[in-house]
Image (cartoon, rainbow, N blue to C red):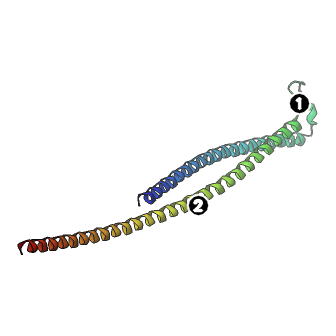
Amino acid sequence: MGQPRRKRKKSTEALAHRVGKVELTLERIESQLRQNESCLEGWSQQAAQLEQSISNQLIDLQNRIREIKATGLHPDGLIQLEEGTAVNLEELERKMEEKYSLLTARERELQDLEKRMSAVLENLRAEIKERDLLLTAREIEIKSFKQTLGSRVEELETLAKRQSGRESKATRLVSFLVDIGKKH
């Protein structure tokens, strides 16, 4: 009777240990997800700032061009640039678009990663709930087994007491008969 109790205790302890490991893994995943979310927010903010900066520069340049065209002067004649200070706006715009494209691609990747991690997290939560239910069911089963075992032990003790009572009565009867036999 001692071995099933030990096996159940060990399996309950093993289940509790496994649930603990799953919870640790779940906490790590949640931590990683929070870190990824903060990185995603930072990159999104950088992308928005970069986009706003480019838009502002473009608007500023368009306004300058309109002002120059409104005066009727040719724009090339107004600006004296040396070769070292000249900026190729088309190349600059292309580079900014490339950076923006990379940032948006990273943002999409992070969103996909976040979705996958959320799905994994939900699966782990479901597994933990299932294991908790199994653990609860096993605990109830163990309690029921203990109660059944306790009542059976009580029955056996009662039966043993009855047997010893009968044996003592039989012993007293034999002793009485022996005493009577000696007297006669």
What residue lies at 81% left-to-right and 40% top-to-bottom?
Answer: 96
Disc 2 crowd rating (10 Å Cα; few below 14, some 14-19, many 20+) is few
Residue position marked by numbered label 1 in the rendering: 79
Quadrant location of the N terminus in the rendered image: bottom left
Is residue 46 rendered to the left or right of residue 141?
right
The amino acid type, in three-letter code, at marker 1 is Ile
At label 2, the amino acid type is: Ala
Residue drawn at point x = 66 percent, y = 52 percent: 117
Q: Residue furthest left?
A: 183
State whether residue 33 is above or below residue 178: above
Label 1 sits on a secondary structure element that is loop
Which of the numbered marks, if any, corresponds to residue 126? 2
Who is closer to the viewer here, 154 or 21? 154
- On screen, residue 130 above or below 88: below
Q: Is residue 181 above or below residue 99?
A: below
Q: Nearer the viewer, residue 150 or 129?
A: 150
User: In which quadrant is the C terminus drawn?
Assistant: bottom left
Q: Quadrant of residue 51?
A: top right
Dot 1, crowdedness within 10 Å: few (<14), some or many (≥20)? few
Q: Position of residue 41 (x, y in %)?
A: 66, 46
